[in-house]
Each structure stands twice: as structure tokens, then as C-alpha cells.
Amino acid sequence: MMESTSAQTGVVTKADAQFFDGINALLASLRVWHPAWPITVVDCGLTLPQRAAILRHEGVKLVAAVDRGFVIPEVMRHYYTSAVYGFFFGA
């Protein structure tokens, strides 16, 4: 007999001030299509009003990213935001 396991599905994403509109739209969409999923947003540079707006979404947890002072090379700044590097390389 195979043992039954229970896995919980959720979302972990990140946002900075530049991409606030996108994260806000993502959170609204997830609440419509997957209202029971837990959502964690890693704050990679949101403003205080943006943090407050994100926390108004039901069931969303906001956590601070670790800032280790990573600097994006000038030639890559058109392609990546500091939020990507801060989250992936700063942890």
C-alpha cells in the first residue's frame, strides 16, 4: 500500500519598487485563481506605501531580503534589477 502524503502549494516571489505594479497584479490574480495558496513576497526594495499595499492582500507574508551589498555591473543594468541579484546572490 502506497503511503499518502500531503503537499501544500504556495508561491514565493520577490519585488522592488520598480516592479510594484507587476507584483500587485500577480497577487490579485493569485487570489482570484488560487485563493487558498500561501504567498510570500521577498522585499527587495519596496517603499513603505508599497509594503503597506502588499500587506493589504489577504494571506500575503512580506519578508525582507538580505542585503549584502551586491552591485550589478553597469553592462547588465538594462537587463536585471537589483532585486534579482539581491535575492539570488545575497542569500
Image: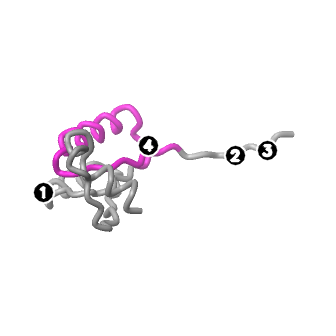
Quadrant (top left, top right, bottom left, bottom right) of the N terminus: top right
What amino acid is found at the position of numbered circle 1 in the picture? Pro
Quadrant (top left, top right, bottom left, bottom right) of the C terminus: bottom left
Residue closer to the observer: 44 or 21 = 44
Answer with mark 4 or mark 3, whichever residue precedes in sequence.
3
What amino acid is found at the position of numbered circle 4 in the picture? Ala
The residue under label 3 is: 3
Residue closer to the observer: 36 or 24 = 24
Residue closer to the observer: 61 or 78 = 78
Answer few, some or many: residues within 10 Å of disc 3's Cα (few below 14, many 20 plus, some between 14 and 19). few
Q: Position of residue 80 (x, y in %)?
A: 27, 44
Answer with mark 1 or mark 3, whichever residue precedes in sequence.
3
The residue under label 4 is: 36
Highlighted range, magenta: 9-38
Q: Mark 4 or mark 1: which is in front? A: 1
Answer few, some or many: residues within 10 Å of disc 4's Cα (few below 14, many 20 plus, some between 14 and 19). some
Toward the left, the furthest residue is 49
Q: Are marks 4 and 1 in contact (CB under 8 Å)?
A: no
Residue 49, by quadrant, is bottom left
Q: Mark 1 or mark 3: which is in front? A: 1
51, above or below 27, in the image = below
Mark 1–mark 3 Cα distance, whole angstroms, equals 47 Å
What amino acid is found at the position of numbered circle 3 in the picture? Glu
Q: Mark 2 or mark 1: which is in front? A: 1
Answer with mark 2 or mark 1, whichever residue precedes in sequence.
2
Does 28 lie within the magenta span?
Answer: yes
| Residue found at x 31% / y 34% | 29
The residue under label 1 is: 49
Does 77 lie within the magenta span?
Answer: no
The residue under label 2 is: 5
Mark 2–mark 4 Cα distance, whole angstroms, equals 18 Å
